[in-house]
Amino acid sequence: MSGVTLSQEKESKKLPSRARKQLTVSTAVRRSTRKCSSLIKKEVTEDYIEMIKQGKVVDGLKVTEFEDKGRGVVATKYLSRGQYVCEYAGTLLSKDEAVVTEKEYEVDDTVGCYMYYFNFNRKEYCVDATKEDKTVGRLINHSRTKSNVKTKAIEVDGVPKLFFIATSDITPDTELLYDYGDHSKQSHTSFPWLKL
């Protein structure tokens, strides 16, 4: 063995023959590009947070007037299941603040009421979207049987936020609808379209 000292040669002979062999074939290590579900969920959540921070509304929504229920939102482009649609934007209130505010709205016939009550991290909140603005989330109408979007709550910079995602693939010219969750007889009498 040229260039090898006698002590190195003796040490080499002490090793099992398989340990003395050197790898002579070079192969590329193949790594999977698949991601585990928890990583995918984390990435999707980060995307939702970023869209909310930027005030994003998915491209392809249009406010439309409906004869029987007023304004609503229609898709003008294809939306895929799970896709972020828009935020339900407004003023975040505690439940107690919201109850007081809602009573003020009830005595004024000129004011509509766009209050969304929800629970987040074991606390009750309300997003008051009554103030007229350019956001579209507040104009998405109700359907118990034909809903194609749903709200999700997420924490953004320590504050709970509501936003919509598509629950099914939505084709152009389809109205966006979600279940308001108000199935009381009084509401159905006042607003018959809530039964649909």
Image (cartoon, rainbow, N blue to C red):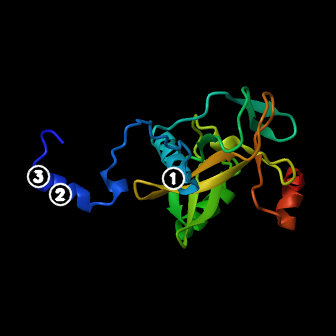
Q: Which mark is residue 39?
A: 1
Q: Residue at x 82, y 61 (%)?
A: 187
Secondary structure beneath disc 2? helix
Tell me the quadrant of the picture where the N terminus can be found. Answer: top left
Disc 3 to disc 1: CB gap under 8 Å: no
Residues under numbered marks 2 and 3 in contact, where contact means CB atoms less than 8 Å apart: yes
Amino acid on which the number 3 mark rests in the picture: Leu
Give the distance between the C-alpha atoms of the residues marked 3 and 1, in whole angstroms: 54 Å
Q: Please name the residue shown 89% across and 60% down the image.
A: 189
The residue shown at (10%, 48%) is 5
Q: Classify residue 44 as left or right of residue 17.
A: right
Between circles 2 and 1, the one closer to the viewer is: 2
Secondary structure under badge 3? helix
Q: Which residue is mark 3?
A: 6
Q: Position of residue 140 (x, y in %)?
A: 72, 43
Counting from the top left corner in percent of width and height, residue 128 is at: 58, 54
* Image position, residue 96 (x, y; %): 55, 70
Quarter of the view holding residue 70: top right
Reading the chain from its start, which is encountered first: label 2 or label 1?
Answer: 2
- Mark 2 highlights which residue? 10
Which of the two marks, 3 or 1, is nearer to us in this view?
3
Residue 134 visible in the shown view: yes
Amino acid found under the numbered disc labelled 2 = Lys
Secondary structure, mark 1, is helix
- Mark 3 or mark 1: whose residue is earlier in sequence: 3
* Mark 2 to mark 3 CA distance (whole Å): 6 Å
Q: Is residue 95 left or right of residue 66?
A: left
Mark 1 Cα-neighbour bin, 10 Å: few <14, some 14–19, many ≥20: few
Instruction: Name above or below for residue 16 compared with residue 129.
Output: below
Report if residue 113 is visible in the image. no
